[in-house]
Amino acid sequence: MTEREWQAFSAFRTDFKTSCRQWLTRCGYEYSAPNEAVSSVEKSAGRGVLHLLQQAAAAENKTPAYPQETPIVYNHSLDEVQGSDTIKLIIVSDNPGKNEQLHKNQRYLVGQAGKVAEGFFRRNPELQTDFRKNVVILNKTPVHTAKTHHLRSLQKANPEIAKLIEISQLWMAEHTAKLHCSLWRNGASGKRGTSGGFVPTGVNDGERGLLDTVGTKIGECFNPPQLWLVGYAELKEKGIFAPYRDALKAAYAGSDAWKSVFVYQHFSMNRFLIDLNEKSQPELTLKENLRRTGLFHRKEILGW
């Protein structure tokens, strides 16, 4: 990363972790890092009710019982990112699931959906992206449920939790867009080389035109960095994540970084690959088909 990119990422990471800790405190829980002996729920025995509501929502929807350990999940994979790394892509999933909230994990997309995503990038080296190294993985809310639609049960059960789910969405949308815009500016201005370092050249008019329509510079993939929204069913009108959608659109006002935002189906149940294959045209490259599919859903969901 360039110095400015590193500063932007570091500020986002610090603010995100602080916010997750504050939201835990608001719900009666203490933060507990994965290397601590006991989980957040164990540490806060007899205080918070959010994990009980999450448990009830799972039972109500006939989800088998599982350990309830972290009701609000910060992605600790972010703590491993260093200034020498290159961020090529931000992927925004829905919310932390059963594996993500386990005390020993507290990381995003580490379940089956994450394995599908990791395999996709590994099988397609032309994307020049290591899913666990070059991708910042975020969610639309850090509030855990076994299934995304269980968030509705939480919203109905407790007005304070419903408010928290909305507040966290607004925070995530605003700050994720801010991070993407900061990373995008450096890539679009030509200050980032293919290895992530400084280069002295800018973007000429021809490159700028291609960048504005395609979203990447000539001969490069995810430069400037893209943002993928994966999972869009609840981004539709009256969906759980409609507040996130509206806040995200507002956060991109005044920035051309929105041209590098794409929308896809979720990696869960292999829907991402099924949809991509259905919409792909054989005469196009993978990168072109990704763009084509992402633009199709972006227009549908965001109107861009």
Image (cartoon, rainbow, N blue to C red):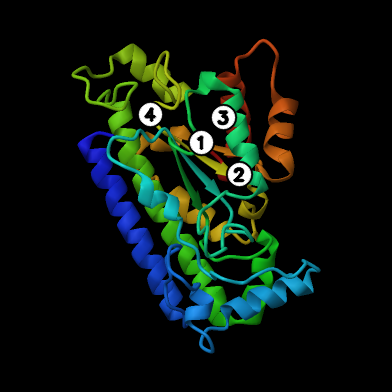
The image's mark for residue 114 is 2
Label 2, residues with CA under 10 Å away: few <14, some 14-19, many ≥20: some
State the residue at coordinates (58%, 39%): 263
State the residue at coordinates (67%, 63%): 146
Q: Position of residue 290 (x, y in %)?
A: 59, 26
Q: Amino acid at mark 4?
A: Pro
**How many numbered marks are there?**
4
Q: Identify the residue under disc 3.
A: 121
Q: Identify the residue under disc 1.
A: 131
Answer whether residue 300 is visible to the viewer in this image: no
Circles 4 and 3: CB atoms closer than 8 Å: no
The image's mark for residue 224 is 4
Q: Answer left or right for 101 relative to 265.
A: left
The vertical placement of 251 against 123, above or below, is below
Q: Amino acid at mark 3?
A: Phe
Circles 1 and 3: CB atoms closer than 8 Å: yes
Circles 2 and 3: CB atoms closer than 8 Å: no
Residue at disc 4, secondary structure: loop
Residue at disc 3, secondary structure: helix
Residue at disc 1, secondary structure: loop
Circles 1 and 2: CB atoms closer than 8 Å: no
Residue at disc 2, secondary structure: helix
